[in-house]
Structure formats: C-alpha cells, structure tokens
C-alpha cells in the first residue's frame, strides 16, 4: 500500500523544466516566462526567480521530456574561459501563486506561466508566481493552456493564406477546346504614325497617255504622244484625314504624228510637253496607320505645246485651256512619320480655249469647236510627312 501511495504522489508531482547553460550548468524549476528576444525566466524550488539571456542558453528540457534549442539558435564554439551566465536575481519571498500554473502561449513563440485572473476580448491579465501581474494584449496571444487541461485558442500563431478560389464549373456541356481550324487572333494595326508636321509634300514619277482631240477635229495623237510624267504636290492638313494643296503635273515626250512629220521634212527634231497646275482636295483613310489609302479631286490651268529641240529652240504650236476635273487615288506605305512611298493614278478632262501656231507649212487653225481631251496617268510617288 505504501508503494502505491508513493507512486501516486510522484505521478501527481508537477514535472520540472531544465535550462542548460553554455558552461554546462543545468538549472531546474518551472519556466514562468519565455521569449526569443528577452530570454527565459525560471522559478526554482525555493521560490526564487532567475533570468537567462537567449545567447546564454544551449537548450531547454521541458518537464514532459521534450527538448528545445536555445531561443538564440544553436550554440557557437565554446569559449576558453568559464561561460557567462545571466546574473542571479536576489532571492525573493516564497511564491504567492501556489499549485499548477496556467500557460499563455504568445504569437512570437514565447510563453508566460502563472495564474490567469482575467480574460476579456481585449487581452489577458496573468499573475506571475512572484505576485506581480502582466497584461498581455489579445493580438499577442496564440492560445491559453489552463492548469485543468483545457485549452483556449485565441488566434492562429501564423496567419494562414486564404484557400485558392476555384472557378465555377462551366454551364452546359464540358468545354472541348478551340475548333481545329480556328484562325489566330489578328494583331491590331500599328498606331502612332501620325505626321510630325501639319504639312505634306510629294514627288511622283510615272507615265501619261492621252485621248480625245485638241479641238476643231484635231486628234490629240497628231499633236502629242505618250509622255514621261513628273508629279509635284504640297499642302497643309485641315484635319488628320483631309488635306488641301497645290499640284504641278509636267509631261515630256515626242511630238504627235502631224508635227513629227513636218519637223522631219524641215530637218528639225521636235518634242512635246504639257503642264497642269491647280488645287487639290485630298481625303486619306487610315491617316495614322502604316498603310493609308487616299482619294483626291482637283481643277486648274492646262497648257500643251510642241517645240523644236535642236539649234535655236522655238515654239511651233501652243495650246492653253482649263483642266475641268482631275480625279486621283493611291496608297501610301509609311515606315515612319517622315517618309512614305506608294502608288498613284489619275484621270482628268481638259478643254483648250486658245491656240498659237507658227509655220512649217501647216495651215493655221483656230479653236472654234472645242474638244475634250482625257488624260490618264500612273506611277510611283514619294511623300514627306505622309
């Protein structure tokens, strides 16, 4: 019977904690406060309290047999002299708090032992074994382990991330993926090629063809042949898409059949030229895109002549009149806001109102019956600030 009572007493006795110091010293008692930053406070069997800094502790052995490394980390190399320990606090009176202790576990990893005398939503008030009290805010408390074995969790010691949100299941039949021949998404057209100046200028090189007659039944082919076309244009932009400018269209080529034969009989070389000058209103689609399409309409002055090209050059015949209508269109390719290259084409209708002639044995003519001369041209043009 005595053996059974002794075993029960030993089992009921509270387990002791042990703090192992770097110099090998072992201090046994009840840990009443523990913090990774301030160290450990342990109550000895005689009721006195001793505090050890974190860097002086090798490990802590709990009363249940668990071991814990020093709050300051694994021990460094041992010093050659005696290890320094925290100074002993003066002996105090026997502890005020008797019996099993409550334990407050902190979020930082530390703990405080004593008797919880108040617990409210703002925090906990705990009385330490020496009779002093501490107020611990609620946000610092992870859980409370009471002496009767109950545990109250105040908050998680480490915040847990919220669980990932799963997308809602698709409505209808399961998605089978894109169609086998789905076209790739088209890239947006490049932007940002707006001209850096509100003006533009262009030069074109192409060819001219004629039709109709010059007036009084004179076929255009008797006076003019196909010509090399030199096109000049410049103006200002009223809006990014609309521009108003001036044009100069110069053509140079051989004289027509009638004048070429007369010049040949006189031992002369002859050439023809045309000049068209006027105003042009232009509209551009895609004014800031790399590819711009445009259409223009204009009207102006027109002249055509045949001159000798050897010796003392002089004019054999000269026509002047009015280019009633000019229609043009084209496309510009722009690699930057300064320079562009593209194609142009146009058609116009001209009527001549005056003629001046010299000899070469040809009868003099007047324009009483005005004709209508269509013109066709096309070529390549180069544009500044397109």
Image (spheres, rainbow, N blue to C red):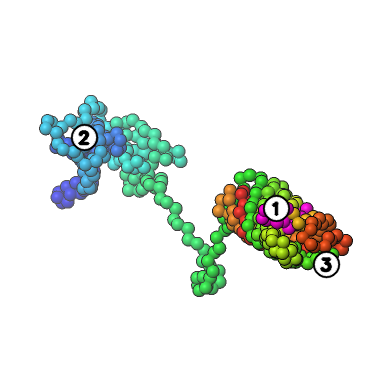
Q: Residue furthest left?
A: 80
Which mark's residue is nearer the viewer, 3 or 2? 3
Q: Quadrant of residue 345?
A: bottom right
* Predominant secondary structure, magenta span: strand
Q: Seen in the image, is 247 located left or right of residue 73?
A: right
Residue tagged 3: 217
Q: Secondary structure at mark 1?
A: loop
Q: Nearer the viewer, residue 28 or 211?
A: 211
Q: Position of residue 215 (x, y in %)?
A: 82, 63
On the question of residue 102 being in view, the answer is: no
Q: Position of residue 211 (x, y in %)?
A: 75, 66
Q: Is residue 384 magenta?
A: no
Q: Secondary structure at mark 2?
A: helix
Residue appearing at x 21%, y 43% in the figure = 61
Vertical position of residue 155 compared to residue 222: above or below: above
**Label 3 – label 1 distance at C-alpha:** 28 Å
Vertical position of residue 17 compared to residue 205: above or below: above
Residue tagged 2: 56
**Label 3 – label 2 distance at C-alpha:** 123 Å
Which mark's residue is nearer the viewer, 1 or 2? 1
Of labels 3 and 1, earlier in sequence is 3
- How would you rate the neighbour count of disc 1 (Cα within 10 Å): few for under 14, some for 14-19, many for 20 or more? few
**Label 1 – label 2 distance at C-alpha:** 116 Å
Q: Nearer the viewer, residue 147 or 154?
A: 154
Residue appearing at x 64%, y 55% in the figure = 204
- How would you rate the neighbour count of disc 2 (Cα within 10 Å): few for under 14, some for 14-19, many for 20 or more? many
Q: Quadrant of residue 303?
A: bottom right
Q: Seen in the image, is 296 located left or right of residue 164?
A: right
Start-end of magenta stretch: 299-314
Which mark's residue is nearer the viewer, 3 or 1? 1
Residue tagged 1: 313
CB of mark 1 within 8 Å of CB of mark 2? no
């Amino acid at each position: 019977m005595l053996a059974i009572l002794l075993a029960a007493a030993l089992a009921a006795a509270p387990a002791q904690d042990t703090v192992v110091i770097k110099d090998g010293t072992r201090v046994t008692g009840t840990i009443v406060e523990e913090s990774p930053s301030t160290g450990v406070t342990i109550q000895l069997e005689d009721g006195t309290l001793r505090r050890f800094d974190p860097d002086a502790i090798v490990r802590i052995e709990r009363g249940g047999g668990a071991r814990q490394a020093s709050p300051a980390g694994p021990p460094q190399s041992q010093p050659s002299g005696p290890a320094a320990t925290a100074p002993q606090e003066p002996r105090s009176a026997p502890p005020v708090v008797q019996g099993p202790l409550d334990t407050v576990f902190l979020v930082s990893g530390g703990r405080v032992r004593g008797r919880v005398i108040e617990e409210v939503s703002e925090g906990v008030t705990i009385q330490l074994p020496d009779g002093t009290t501490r107020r611990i805010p609620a946000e610092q408390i992870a859980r409370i382990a009471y002496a009767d074995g109950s545990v109250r969790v105040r908050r998680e010691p480490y915040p847990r991330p919220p669980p990932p949100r799963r997308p809602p299941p698709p409505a209808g039949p399961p998605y089978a993926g894109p169609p086998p021949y789905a076209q790739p998404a088209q890239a947006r057209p490049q932007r940002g090629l707006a001209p850096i100046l509100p003006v533009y200028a262009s030069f074109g090189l192409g060819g001219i063809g004629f039709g109709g007659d010059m007036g009084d039944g004179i076929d255009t082919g008797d006076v003019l042949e196909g010509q090399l076309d030199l096109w000049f244009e410049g103006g200002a932009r009223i809006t990014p898409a609309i521009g108003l400018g001036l044009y100069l269209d110069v053509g140079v080529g051989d004289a027509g059949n009638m004048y070429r034969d007369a010049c040949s009989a006189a031992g002369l070389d002859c050439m023809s030229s045309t000049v068209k000058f006027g105003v042009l209103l232009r509209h551009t689609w895609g004014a800031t895109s790399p590819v711009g399409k445009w259409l223009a309409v204009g009207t102006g002055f027109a002249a055509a002549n045949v001159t000798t090209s050897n010796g003392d050059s002089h004019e054999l015949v000269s026509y002047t009149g009015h280019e009633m209508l000019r229609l043009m269109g084209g496309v510009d390719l722009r690699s930057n806001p300064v320079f562009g290259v593209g194609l142009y084409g146009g058609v116009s209708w001209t009527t001549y109102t005056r003629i001046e002639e010299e000899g070469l044995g040809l009868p003099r003519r007047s324009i009483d019956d005005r004709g209508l001369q269509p013109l066709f041209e096309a070529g390549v043009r180069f544009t500044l600030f397109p």
